[in-house]
Amino acid sequence: MMNLFSLGGDVAFVTGAGSGIGQRIAIGLAEAGADVVCYGHSSGGGLEQTAARIEALGHRSLAIIGSVTSAEEIAAAIARTEREIGPLTVAVNNAGIANAAPAEEMGEEQWNRLYEINVNGVFLSCQAQARVMLPRAKGSIINIASMSGSIVNRGLLQAHYNSSKAAVIHLSKSLAMEWADRGLRVNVISPGYTLTPMNQRPEVAEQRKIFERDTPMGRMATVDEMVGPAVFLASRAASFVTGIDLIVDGGFVCW
């Protein structure tokens, strides 16, 4: 039965793999048996560190620097993946940004930049991945959204972020339906409040207490807790699962 969750023989491509949830999922896919290509912007060597940890597990990896907002760079990275590692079978589109501002004061540049990465970047990534997966009628794409795509977080002024994540969820469902009969599954993981490096900074310590208080399980998620959902959706265990939004939030959206 556990072989259902094995990713042995799979080749995965993870965007935003240099830190946080993306880094942990990339390593987690390797722990399940996949070779994993790490894609993202150059910042502090995080991509290289992720790739090194994957190789230490005995799996092949590449660290490819590029932007999810460039169709050409994504296509080149996937071509390199297939050339040097093998046929792509799993993709996790995690790259995204977050910030906050009152809606009535938010500048157009701030709005457009977040949408360019969080929505356009996911679409361009899915498009490039599907172009190599669809001819083989095999593949699993997992897009990382947020519970903020389903609810509005109390006290956080993020109209742009929340709506971008809602767009990712509905985009994923739309793509899942386009490609359902062609062997390609598309699903979403929507994390709740998670202990990423951004949420472990001293300046957000008080806010973190509020996040923990408002979550029914009484704590924030660890990045490790995003690995199981990703492995499930990537694996044969989810062979009849497409178009779902898997919310991993400790029960937050129930309240």
Image (cartoon, rainbow, N blue to C red):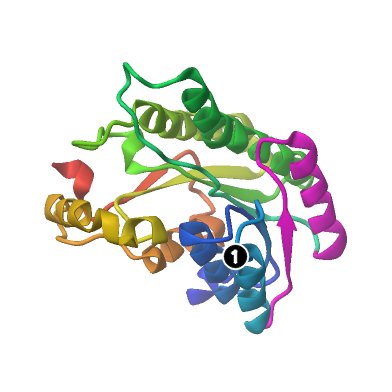
Which corner quadrant of the image does residue 43 belong to?
bottom right
Determine if residue 157 is in view. Answer: yes
Residue at the (22%, 58%) spot, across then down = 205
| Label total for image | 1
Relative horizontal placement of residue 248, taking residue 57 as reference (left or right): left
Residue occupying the far right of the picture: 83
Relative horizontal placement of residue 64, taking residue 227 as reference (left or right): right
Foreground: 89 or 237?
Answer: 89
Foreground: 140 or 120?
Answer: 120
Considering only vertical position in the picture, is 24 above or below 77?
A: below
Q: Give the secondary structure at mark 1.
A: helix
Q: Amino acid at mark 1?
A: Gly
Q: Which residue is mark 1?
A: 46
Considering only vertical position in the picture, is 5 above or below 152?
A: below
Considering only vertical position in the picture, is 28 above or below 211?
A: below
Q: Position of residue 173 (x, y in %)?
A: 49, 33
Screen quadrant of the C terminus: top left
| Dot 1 alpha-carbon crowd within 10 angstroms: few under 14, some 14 to 19, many 20 or more | many
Residue at the (83%, 50%) spot, across then down = 79
Q: Position of residue 136 (x, y in %)?
A: 78, 47
Instruction: Write down the region rendered in magenta.
Output: 58-85
Residue at the (69%, 77%) spot, across then down = 59
Q: Position of residue 253 (x, y in %)?
A: 22, 42
Foreground: 203 or 253?
Answer: 203
Determine if residue 174 is in view. Answer: no
Q: Is residue 185 magenta?
A: no
Q: Position of residue 35 (x, y in %)?
A: 69, 69
Relative horizontal placement of residue 156, taking residue 115 as reference (left or right): left
Residue at the (25%, 36%) spot, across then down = 156
Which corner quadrant of the image does residue 57 belong to?
bottom right
